[in-house]
Amino acid sequence: MELKKIKPLLGNNLDMVFSELDIAHQKNGDNITCPCPAHEGSDNPNGFSFSVDRQIWGCWTRGCHQEFGNDILGLIRGSLSLKTGEEVGFSQALRWACRVLNVDSKNVAVDKVEEPDEFVKLVSILSQESQQNEHPCPTLDCDVSHPSDYFVSRGFSEDTLLHFEVGDCLQKKSSMVNRAIIPIHNSAGDQIVSYIGRSVRENIKPKFLFTQGFSKTRYLYNYHRAAEKIAETSCVFITEGQGDVWKLHEAGVSNAVGIFGKSISLPQKSMLEKSGATKLVVLTDNDQAGRESKVKIQREMSRMFKIVFPRMSRKDLGDMTVKQIKEDILPQLEGMF
């Protein structure tokens, strides 16, 4: 069977595909809508749409379809990547599809496709391009005021926010209106690859808005600033988010990076392996998902690194003051920062 025949089979069995991927959804005529199944923090109930007629999908919150491809195999790849916490490739998505369709994947002739579709082209491009050249430099449709008044109100110092270039969007007509702006750099620090807009009001959804096309699995937040200290100490502090990195910075820890969630992806693992680190201090949250994350990191990375899980007196770093971090956590980690 040719690859080009697999997609129509998947399209004719959408209910089964969505069920196998555990995607709860609603049908509105020709469109299927739900929170995006390809990224964490899917707090927009209509952030994802799938056109039954055109057999393409879109993530209108973070542009996940641009990362994984907007056809049904791209949807499978994106959804499985989130579920496994690792970047799922084209061949893995194809094997999954064949299993669901009860088709022998060994008999699927991928090389018989006369002209590769956009998804196949995208996979080829991603495999060839370096991380630094993956995305063009994003643009913001607003001026940014530094430091961010919103994060100052959350207890961060102005010096910290200036250090991390965190500000507030000023334009009312901007797509980032009522958001604090956080720049994300590549590993060398010579290019901004994305901006995160953090809503400053609880009624504004989604809470975190990325500029379009950003692939969070391919970057470590703050790596370019932390790299020198990582090489000096042979240690990396692993946190979930940007605020955790800032809080550690205020406590005197400069070798901390953020993984944009609870899972370390394959590209992120590769960066850590090349960083010169031999120890990982894992500071994911103490909720159930965070504990599961710790188990997964221990299982997958203990062969390459010494893994340290400090005791935490609060649920997460965000709940701790700088004084508490210095008194409760850092004494456990002498020589690691």
Image (cartoon, rainbow, N blue to C red):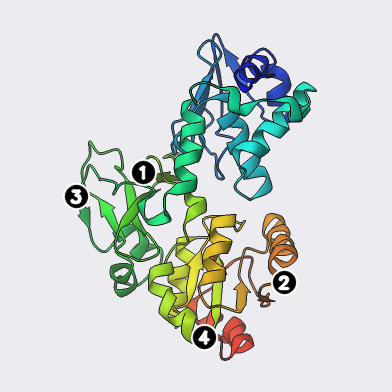
Query: What amino acid is labelled 3 in the image?
Result: Asp
**Residue located beneath label 2 in the image:** 303
Q: What residue is pinned by disc 1?
A: 211
Q: CA distance from mark 2 to mark 1?
A: 36 Å
Labels 4 and 3: the sequence-earlier one: 3
Mark number displayed over residue 166? none
Query: Which amino acid does the dot numbered 1 rest on?
Result: Thr
In primary-sequence order, the first of circles 3 and 2 is 3
Between label 2 and label 4, give the one nearer the viewer. Answer: 2
| Residue under label 4 | 233
Q: Residue at x 71, y 63 (%)?
A: 300
Secondary structure of the residue carrying tag 1 is loop
Looking at marks 3 and 1 on the same chain, the residue that comes earlier in the sequence is marked by 3
- Neighbourhood count class around disc 1 (C-alpha, 10 Å): few under 14, some 14–19, many 20 upward: some
Name the residue: 44% across, 82% down. Answer: 229
Residue 285 occupies quadrant = bottom right
2 or 4: tag closer to the N-terminus:
4
Helix, strand or loop status at disc 4 = helix
Q: CA distance from mark 4 to mark 3?
A: 38 Å
In-image side of 39 versus 211 (left or right): right
Badges 3 and 1: C-beta atoms under 8 Å apart? no
Give the residue displayed 56% in from the left and 31% down from the top: 74
The answer to whether any part of residue 199 appears in the image is no
Task: Specify the label residue 143 is tagged with.
Answer: 3
